[in-house]
Amino acid sequence: MRIDKYLWTIRMFKTRSIATDACKKGHVKLNNVNAKPSKDVYIGEKITVRKNQINYQLEVLDIPPNRVGAKLVDLYRKDTTPKEAFERTDMLKFAKDYYRKKGAGRPSKKDRRDLDEYQENGTFDNEN
């Protein structure tokens, strides 16, 4: 079975064309080698898929005859993605909104002046 079709049948991608595009962009590796969409997949091979800033590592257990339900996906693949990959994306979320709360808008003139003051003296105006 083609790798793009395999990734679609195990519900890694919503459509087959998205799976094909991911292969063309180099986001899919088969046994640590970039895979073209037409590359055949066999039982026991290792697949690495870069999706949503996570490198998913999959092992092919069996070839499905057609697209399978979400509950049956684990019969055809084994997910060996380390937990650190998911934790790293959680840390990225926290790192992005460390300064301003969502919806607070851009800094005002007073905020900018306070930041300049802090950079020069190491203290804020209202701390004196």
Image (tube, rainbow, N blue to C red):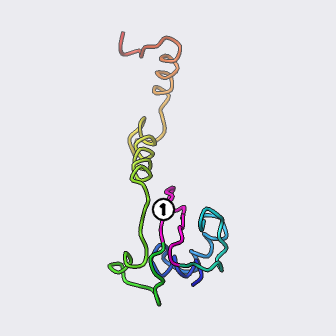
User: Toward the viewer: 4 or 21?
Assistant: 4
Name the residue nearer the viewer: 5 or 43: 43
Q: Position of residue 104 (x, y in %)?
A: 40, 41
Q: Is residue 90 left or right of residue 2?
A: left
Instruction: Please name the residue shown 52% across and 80% down the image.
Output: 6
Which amino acid type is shown beneath numbered disc 1? Tyr
Residue 68 at x, y percent in the picture: 41, 84
Q: Is residue 101 above or below residue 114?
A: below
Residue 11, quarter of picture? bottom left
Q: Of residues 121 and 61, which is closer to you in this image?
A: 61
Q: Residues within 10 Å of mark 1 (few under 14, many from 20)?
A: some
- The residue at which mark 1 appears reads as 56
Q: Quadrant of the C terminus?
A: top left
Dividing the picture into quadrants, the one containing residue 47 is bottom right
User: Which secondary structure dominates the residues rendered in magenta?
Assistant: strand
In the image, farthest residue toward the front: 44
Vertically, is 51 above or below 38? above
Q: Which residue in the rendered view is the most extreme toward the left?
A: 71
The residue sitting at 54% across, 64% down in the picture is 48
Residue 79 lies in magenta, yes or no?
Answer: no
Mark 1: which secondary structure? strand
Span highlighted in magenta in the image? 43-59
The N terminus lies in which quarter of the figure? Answer: bottom right
Residue 123 in view (yes/no): yes
Which residue is at 48% across, 76% downward?
14
Residue 22, located in which quarter of the rendered image? bottom right
Residue 123 horizontal/vertical position (percent): 43, 14
Find residue 76 and report its horizontal and vertical position in percent: 42, 78
Magenta highlight on residue 56: yes
Q: How many marks?
A: 1
